[in-house]
Image (cartoon, rainbow, N blue to C red):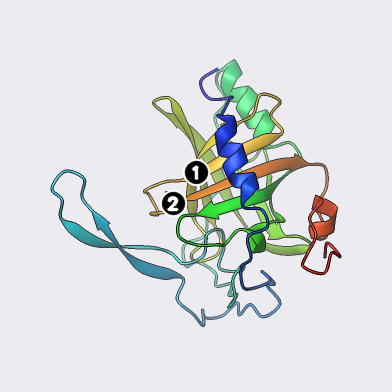
Amino acid sequence: MKYLLFPITVILFLIACKNDPAPGTGSTSNANPQQPQHPITETKMMVDSVTGKAYDVQRPVNAISTAISDTPTATKDAVQPHAEPPEAASAQSKRIVHALTQNYWVIWGLSRIGQKANRPHQGTWFKFSPDGNYEYGHFSQPIGKGAWSWEYRGEKAYLLLDSELLGDDREWSFLLGRDEDVMIWVGTERYHTNDIQCKLQKLLFIPKNRGEMGYKDEKGTGK
């Protein structure tokens, strides 16, 4: 298999940050579906590895979604996604599509270099359908829908998420665990999110709160 196994150090790194404190609850109750009230991208300086010259790029402010932040918004993208069934020509491709489209994939841990942004994203889930559509949300709160696709580039597999919401498009390189119930996502240069890593767990249901994921808040209630 090209990529079904991943280093245990990656998992341990993500699990270690599971209780990082971070502001915000991730609630989407105040999301404005008309116009974003806060920037959805930010300017970051990059350095060309060949020339050594610095240049600015635009990257998403929020690691996963504009709806999961201190100032949640939900603005429809002017260009809506178009879903197509993912290609599954080989036995390996069929296995990957089957693994991705079974049950819910839930973020268990997230790390972004330079930020303690793990906790608000725990409980974010994705449901991939065989027809190329997907849904995502945060605990019991739906966020949006979109189209998904995947492909190999060399020895790596990439997952592309084309969301109906402005600012929520993402590309991830991904690794499936041996039993196909754990997955690691790493951001790419396409959206300048290669400083983000996520660990996702496959579940039969959408968790209602942190307690159902085995976590506890500062008061020990797990909610």
- Examine the image and state in which quarter residue 34 appears: bottom right
Furthest-left residue in view? 51
From the viewer's perspective, is residue 40 above or below residue 211? Answer: below
Q: Position of residue 129 (x, y in %)?
A: 68, 42
Residue at 66%, 61% (x, y): give it.
119
Mark nearer the N terminus (2 vs 1): 1
Residue at 45%, 76% (x, y): give it.
39
| Residue carrying label 2 | 195
Q: Secondary structure at mark 1?
A: strand
Q: Marks 2 and 1, how far apart in space? A: 8 Å
Q: Secondary structure at mark 2?
A: loop
Q: Nearer the viewer, residue 114 or 78?
A: 114
Q: Amino acid at mark 1?
A: Val
Residue at 42%, 68% (x, y): give it.
41
Q: Position of residue 221 (x, y in %)?
A: 86, 65
Q: Position of residue 185 (x, y in %)?
A: 55, 42
- Examine the image and state in which quarter residue 137 appears: bottom right
- Examine the image and state in which quarter residue 178 appears: top right
Q: Position of residue 175 (x, y in %)?
A: 56, 33
Q: Dot 2: few (<14), some (14–19), or many (≥20) neighbours within 10 Å? A: some
Q: Dot 1: few (<14), some (14–19), or many (≥20) neighbours within 10 Å? A: many
Q: Amino acid at mark 2?
A: Asp
| Residue carrying label 1 | 186
